[in-house]
Image (tube, helix red, strand yellow):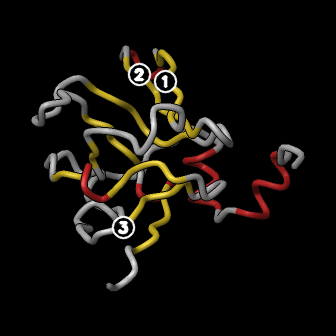
Amino acid sequence: MEPLTEEDWKKKLTPEEFAILRGKGTERPFTGKFNDHFVQGTYVCKGCGEALFDSGSKFDSHCGWPAFDSEIRKDVITETRDTSHGMIRTEITCSKCGGHLGHVFDDGPTDTGIRYCVNSLSLDFDPKPEE
């Protein structure tokens, strides 16, 4: 499959999703649909559908964005140094499509010590099937 052009992305995504996934934007805190979402299933990349986070790794960080303490597999997230806005952070992107997801911090409250802080607009959700 050929990589999508920026024009293809604009057709595939809403303007808000495009601003986040392709423009490295950030949604306002406490506004995303997955911030207070605690249902069993899998969070996937809005851009390409790649599975990123299991719901079991999600926790309430009180930061205003969905937070996870681990990715579903080690190869699904790419980390890059981000020095924008006068800060030094680590940006996280989808390894498959390069879509901007958010940032990762080493202040997580669980045993991993990790807090993936992710924009809801970067995600879709696949609920766990009823048993």
What's the residue type where badge 1 is placed?
Glu
Q: Distance between the residues labelled 1 and 3?
A: 24 Å
Look at the numbered disc 3 and give the secondary structure of its residue. Answer: strand
Tell us which disc is closer to us: 1 or 3: 3
7 w.r.t. 41: above or below: above
Pointers 1 and 3 in contact (CB under 8 A)?
no
What's the residue type where badge 2 is placed?
Thr
Q: Distance between the residues labelled 2 and 3?
A: 26 Å
Pointers 1 and 2 in contact (CB under 8 A)?
yes
73 w.r.t. 44: above or below: above
Q: Which residue bears the numbered disc 2? A: 90
Residue found 36% across the figure and 17% down from its top: 87
> Which badge, 1 or 2, comes first in the chain's sequence?
1
Q: Which of 2 and 12 is in front in this view?
A: 2
Residue found 85% across the figure and 46% down from its top: 5
Q: Residue furthest front?
A: 131
> Which badge, 1 or 3, comes first in the chain's sequence?
3
Tell us which disc is closer to us: 1 or 2: 1
